[in-house]
């Protein structure tokens, strides 16, 4: 009984909070800055409404539910890729010097991670005879590998170049990263168990998702912090001379 | 079973990595408010001398091979330190300039924009130059830089003039980088 209440809480509450995020994004104009994340939030709510409605019908959590869930997961995954690309583009817009090398790095990393994901799919196939189940979780696992890798790349780039994250973008990336890594572990376990869900794993995944939604709420609903260390004028420097020297060294 | 365990461990590692990277996303406010204290002086002339192929050639012809390899390793190690320091300074300047981009003064904002651009390029070049220098340390006898520096005096002068245009009265940072 308690577990059932907890499951329902972890299922319903994050989506109510997502509704609040959606509303706040419309009000604050963030919808225009992060259209893919806005779409992702809206789609997650829609998916929840559809799945919850199905679970209340005689179908309950049967075949129809699994099919709808699989289709929803596929669409949600594609949109999540859009969100990650949106975060990269956000950085490239903010720092034009990163545009060329950053895009090349993004493309290269995507190809490399695709190969890793394909390798994982070959090395650890599912044992379940259910094609839909296999396809859903195998895709989810492959996509989680890709998304984790891309988000680690994004965080590494920002750390190496000491770039300033806008707190909204940081919150979106952090939540998405945590979710992708837990999803990777969960989909691997699901594929190994060859069954649609597992109570403990389900609860853990749902709790993680709840945490991610709280992270998004925290970063998207609070106002962007004003910088308190604006220096005027900008200090003098000899970076151009250093750039010239290093450019020559690299291009020798 | 083993693959699943490996994947779960990979996921855990990815999560820890993400959290670690996210935790260190910003330089501390202290660094940004007192950048001078955290920047280290780097002499570009000394660096130029360390990676000068003519200098390298001179040492190669005047020293015994073991002696040359030892000296060259030390020179390149010093060059790596110089580049690392310059890259670290660039990171601090980048964050300082990032704040300057929001200045209401158009000249400051423009200079800050240019500084951000230069700092990013410097860190990019540093990421390419450091492995080259390490390669040179591993193979000190090999010619990893066969092409001579083709820098004319006019180009140097132009750079200095350009740099002069970017210079502003400072609060003591000027001597640091």
Image (cartoon, rainbow, N blue to C red):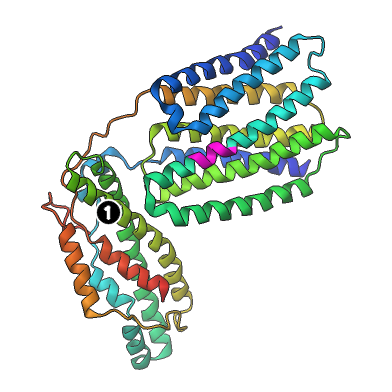
Furthest-front residue in view?
A32
Where on the picture, by quarter, is residue A199?
top right
Furthest-left residue in view?
B169
Q: Pinpoint residue B172: horizontal percent, then vertical percent.
A: 13, 52
With respect to residue A235, does B160 lie above or below?
Answer: below
Q: Residue at coordinates 52% horizontally, 55% vertically from top-left?
A: A105
| Residue A84 on the magenta span | yes
| Residue B8 on the magenta span | no
Q: Pinpoint residue B9: horizontal percent, then vertical percent.
A: 65, 41
With respect to residue B40, does A197 lie above or below?
Answer: above
Identify the subunit bearing mark 1: B
Where on the picture, by quarter, is residue B162?
bottom left
**Residue B17 showing in the rendered view:** no
With respect to residue B110, does B70 lie above or below?
Answer: below
Q: Pinpoint residue B129: horizontal percent, then vertical percent.
A: 41, 67
Where on the picture, by quarter, is residue A229?
top left
Camera-side residue of A164 and B76: A164
Q: Is residue B60 left or right of A76 when viewed as pictured?
A: left
Magenta residue span: A81-86
Q: Is residue A59 left or right of B127 when viewed as pictured?
A: right
Q: Residue at coordinates 25% horizontally, 68% vertically from top-left?
A: B44
Q: Residue at coordinates 81% horizontally, 32% vertically from top-left?
A: A132
User: Mark 1 = which residue?
Assistant: B114
Q: Residue at coordinates 21% horizontally, 58% vertically from top-left?
A: A237
Q: Pinpoint residue A166: horizontal percent, then vertical percent.
A: 38, 36
Q: Quadrant of the N terminus of chain A?
A: top right
Magenta stretch secondary structure, dominant? helix
**Residue B36 showing in the rendered view:** yes
Secondary structure category for the residue under label 1: helix
Camera-side residue of A86 and A221: A86
């Amino acid at each position: 009984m308690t577990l059932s209440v907890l499951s329902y809480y972890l299922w319903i509450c994050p989506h109510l909070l997502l509704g609040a995020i959606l509303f706040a994004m419309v009000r604050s104009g963030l919808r225009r800055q992060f259209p893919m994340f806005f779409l992702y939030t809206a789609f997650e709510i829609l998916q929840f409404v559809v799945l919850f409605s199905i679970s209340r019908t005689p179908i309950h959590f049967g075949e129809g539910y699994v099919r709808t869930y699989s289709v929803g997961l596929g669409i949600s995954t594609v949109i999540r890729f859009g969100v990650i690309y949106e975060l990269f583009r956000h950085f490239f817009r903010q720092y034009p010097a990163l545009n060329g090398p950053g895009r090349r790095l993004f493309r290269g990393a995507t190809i490399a991670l695709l190969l890793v994901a394909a390798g994982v799919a070959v090395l650890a196939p599912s044992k379940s005879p259910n094609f839909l189940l296999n396809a859903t979780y195998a895709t989810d696992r492959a996509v989680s590998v890709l998304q984790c890798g891309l988000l680690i790349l994004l965080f590494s780039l920002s750390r190496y170049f000491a770039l300033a994250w806008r707190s909204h973008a940081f919150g979106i990336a952090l939540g998405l990263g945590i979710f992708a890594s837990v999803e990777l572990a969960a989909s691997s376990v699901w594929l190994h168990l060859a069954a649609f869900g597992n109570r403990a794993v389900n609860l853990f995944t749902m709790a993680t998702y709840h945490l991610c939604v709280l992270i998004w709420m925290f970063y998207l609903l609070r106002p962007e912090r004003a910088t308190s260390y604006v220096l005027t004028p900008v200090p003098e420097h000899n970076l151009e001379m250093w750039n010239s020297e290093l450019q020559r060294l690299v291009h020798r | 079973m083993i693959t699943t365990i490996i994947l779960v461990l990979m996921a855990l590692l990815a999560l820890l990595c993400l959290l670690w990277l996210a935790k260190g996303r910003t330089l501390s406010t202290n660094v940004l408010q007192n950048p001078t204290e955290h920047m280290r002086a780097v002499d570009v002339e000394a660096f130029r001398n360390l990676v000068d192929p003519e200098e390298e050639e001179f040492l190669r012809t005047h020293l015994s091979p073991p002696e040359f390899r030892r000296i060259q390793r030390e020179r390149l190690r010093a060059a790596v330190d110089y580049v690392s320091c310059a890259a670290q300074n660039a990171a601090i300047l980048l964050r300082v300039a990032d704040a300057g981009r929001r200045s209401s003064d158009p000249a400051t904002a423009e200079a800050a924009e240019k500084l951000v651009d230069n700092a990013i390029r410097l860190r990019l070049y540093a990421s390419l130059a450091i492995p080259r220098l390490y390669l040179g340390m591993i193979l000190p006898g090999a010619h990893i830089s066969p092409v001579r520096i083709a820098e004319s005096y006019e180009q140097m002068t132009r750079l200095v003039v350009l740099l002069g245009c970017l210079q502003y009265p400072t609060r003591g940072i000027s001597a640091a980088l």
